[in-house]
Amino acid sequence: MSQAKGPLAGVRIVELGGIGPVPFAAMLLSDLGADIVRIDRITAHDGGAPIEPRFNLLNRGRRSVAMDLKNPASVQAVLRLVAQADALLEGFRPGVAEKLGLGPDACAAANPRLVYGRMTGWGQDGPMAQEPGHDVNYISLSGVLHAIGRAGEPPAIPLNLTGDFGGGSLYLALGVVSAVLEARQSGRGQVVDTAMVDGSASLMTLIYGLVAAGYWQDERGVNRLDSGAPWYNVYECADGRYVSIGANETRFYNNAVRLLGLEGAGLPDQHDRAGWPMMKDRFAAAFRSRTRDEWVALAAGRETCIAPILSMSEAPHHPHLRARGTFVEVEGIVQPAPAPRFSRTEAAIQRPPAAPGEHTDEVLADWGFTSEDIGALRGAGAVA
């Protein structure tokens, strides 16, 4: 794997292992060059998918140390790492890290410049702070889930992209990088309280503004971006596959109408909501007359905002994505490449996902532990 040279090269982070949002945030920071040590449990936890470590792509790019964080010797070892780090990432319920002896106060005592990045669903405070939950629960409260889906149908679950990763991981990564920059000016660390309910609400800022303006109905499937509009939608083609159309602007809409053979067919005005149901029927009938790939070929260069809906097995082979290197293959596993792109400090996957504890001795030695220190930790059952 390549040596880190991304924009975060030289930043050192300790990640207390977990599942989902914190690992994805750590993956993003690692792809951008940060040196991240992941502290995995000696015994497996009860979350996540039961797959081999090499397929757990959210863990790529980091070295793994296996520790028993209920062992005081492990806690002291983590604090030695923290003393040399720029940031720590953790995703426990509020108060758990404090009970382990690894809360913000203990870590700040070891390193006053440390940025302490916390990830929870509900936040560190509030009446629901201690409640369990998952992505679908957090986006239920923030208004996101209610807004996604077709009219007359139940809300559509957008995988776990909006709460876990969009509203969680991305905000944690941005918050930690921002606080590290500030700490380098002030010499003081701080806590970054990332809550998926907050982040998912933040992602809805545009829509909340449109609701306040009276432009957006607080009802799913009847608005211009939620499948209400016929020209911002998905349609089945003759072969049972689908295309998307996003012809918001008038010129793109007019191009699409011509491509579909509907010019002069008596369609209502593009923004006449009363005419949208009839327009959807006409669009649907037109799209069913050809296969997906036939429509894509016809639309090429015509500025219609029509695209094929590709499966995950198809997407890596699309010519545009191949040309950009949007997907890469690492040790036989196809996966998304680091994003975004940098003109000078190129981001890169530093290494494939590690098995828990794969780098215990190597990491501890790199971070200043002697062979005697490591032997003592192993003898105490603190590391594996």
Image (tube, rainbow, N blue to C red):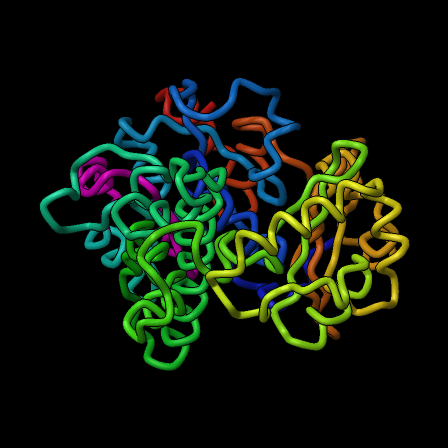
The answer to whether residue 376 of the structure is visible from this angle is no
Q: Is residue 45 above or below residue 265?
A: above
What's the residue at 33%, 50% (across, down)? Answer: 196
The answer to whether residue 236 of the structure is visible from this angle is yes
Nearer the observer, 324 or 204: 204
Residue 262 appears in which quarter of the rendering?
bottom right
Q: Is residue 222 above or below residue 266?
A: above
What's the residue at 33%, 75% (across, down)? Answer: 187
Q: Looking at this rendering, what residue extends furthest in the front direction?
A: 266
Give the x, y percent position of residue 170. Answer: 46, 57
What's the residue at 29%, 51% (across, down)? Answer: 197
Q: Looking at this rendering, what residue extends furthest in the left direction?
A: 127
Residue 249 appears in which quarter of the rendering?
bottom right
Give the x, y percent position of residue 223. Answer: 45, 59
What's the residue at 53%, 58% (across, down)? Answer: 276
Q: Is residue 314 above or below residue 268?
A: above
Nearer the observer, 239 or 116: 239
Nearer the observer, 145 or 173: 145
Figure quadrant of the N terminus: top right
Q: Is residue 148 left or right of residue 293?
A: left
Based on the picture, tell me whether residue 85 belongs to the magenta stretch.
yes
Give the x, y percent position of residue 269. Answer: 58, 71
Which range is magenta?
A: 82-103
Based on the picture, tell me whether residue 51 belongs to the magenta stretch.
no
Nearer the observer, 112 or 162: 162
Q: Is residue 162 left or right of residue 317?
A: left
Give the x, y percent position of residue 86. Answer: 43, 61
Q: Is residue 183 above or below residue 78?
A: below
